[in-house]
Amino acid sequence: MIEDCSIEILLVEDNPNDIELELRAFKKNNLGNKVLVVRDGAEAIDYLFGTGIYADRKNYIQPKVILLDLKLPKIDGLEVLRIIRSDEKTKMIPVVVLTSSNEEKDLIESYQLGVNSYITKPIEFDQFVQVTANLGYYWILLNKLPFKPIR
Amino acid sequence: MQTTFQTIEDWLGIEEAKEEYRALLNILEDFEEEKIKFQQIQKAILNLLDDMIEERIKSEQTKQALMNILEDIETERQKIEKSKVLLELANKELEAFSYSVSHDLQAPLRAINGFAQAVVEDYSDKLDEEGQRYIKLIQKNSRFMGQLIQDLLAFSRLGRQQIGTTEIDMERLAKDVFEELKGEASNRVIEFKLGSLPKAWCDPTMAHQIFVNLLSNALKFTGHREKAVIEIGYLQKENEGYYYIKDNGAGFDMKYVDKLFGVFQRLHTYEEFEGTGIGLALVKRIVTKHGGRIWAEGNINEGACFYFTLSRGEK
């Protein structure tokens, strides 16, 4: 179990290839050690609320940004977003949807649920690295948060 | 009757009564005649009534027959309604299917492209020229497949999209789109002729898409010409008016004109002209959605002309 204060990005992603490529892209932007990967919606909820396999953790910081895939096992991305936004403890954490879906329906629903940003995963790896760099730069360095990251 | 006579005898004298009787008898005789006449009339009326009843029965029967026909029509209508619902359902399922297929196809593609890139970055020195060329081919093809999927998604999305029509200044739109696309071909000699185009009722995004696809095709297929000539105009023939876009490009064989608007149908090799073969299928879908039609004429090496109609004046 990872338990340190360096986690700034929570990556919610189930596809192992995408995870490896995304981590590679983060590493290229020197963000590799700030990412924690959870493999489905339920694990994301457990991490954020300190339940289930994360129940033993007392104090840990909330991420500065959650990168959320939409198509996830157990609890899908939109449902995760709904839960995050409806709880006082998590409602202010920035959430960026990172998905293959370009569908208007997904876009509208995500924004209706209060997503902060919506990015489609590019197929080209170079572009993907660029997107990751932009995300890291913006959400980790530039963006100011209204809350202290300690839960 | 009896009571009446007695009353009259009591009332008048006998002689007077006799006179009165006679008169009364006369009246009664007349009355009898009238009665017969009346009975005849009554009979006639009864006959008429009989006839009328017959007519009524007939009309009742006709009504029943009509009701039956109406019922049949209603049954047919319900059947049609039912198959319409089923058709819509099947259509929705198909759209959902193509959406999720296209969607899920992208993930492995990202992996293929990404890991090929990783090989290029991390192991370039271990690969000879041929090995590097293969990797480049892998990437080029995964990129192309990505484009195919994107196009397929766009095509499927179009099927589900609601159209919001508004009045479009087609002439201005054609000009804007040409300016937009000309930038990518700035080193070429292009003569662009724009006729006077009437306004049309169309979804703005889709109208834009029509011109983007048709004009970029015209630009693409005139790529081998020293001077490209592209013309957009409008013709009115009988009751129908149509927009057209004509070029002096590579053209096509009329033998294959039916294939022109099919999804992923191409009439040229990739080496000659690139593209996924979705553009015209998209345009056709848009035009059909707007109640219009599209057709084309062309000859090999003598250019092509695309015609389309859009309903005008109505929403």
Image (cartoon, coloured by chain):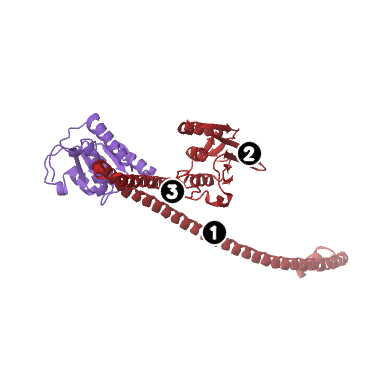
Chain colours: A purple, B red
Q: Decide which of B272, B247 is in the foreground and name it.
A: B272
Residue B235 at least partly seen: yes
Give the residue pinned by disc 2. B235
Please give the name of the residue rendered at 38% of the width and 47% of the height, measured from the top-left corner: B145
Q: In this view, does B12 lie above or below A102?
A: below
Q: Decide which of B236, A65 is in the foreground and name it.
A: B236
Q: Is mark 1 on a helix, strand or loop?
A: helix
Q: Which of marks 3 and 1 is in front?
A: 3
When asked about the image quadrant of residue B39, the answer is bottom right
Name the quadrant of the N terminus of chain B: bottom right
Give the residue pinned by disc 3. B156
Label 1 vs 2, first from the N-terminus: 1
Q: Decide which of B94, B75 is in the foreground and name it.
A: B94
When asked about the image quadrant of residue A113, the answer is top left
Q: Is mark 2 on a helix, strand or loop?
A: strand
Q: Are marks 3 and 1 in contact (CB under 8 Å)?
A: no
Name the quadrant of the C terminus of chain B: top right
Please give the name of the residue rendered at 53% of the width and 37% of the height, measured from the top-left corner: B225
Q: How crowded is mark 2: few (under 14 residues within 10 Å), some or many (20 or more)?
A: some
User: How far is mark 2 from mark 3, CA to CA?
Assistant: 32 Å
Label 2 vs 3, first from the N-terminus: 3
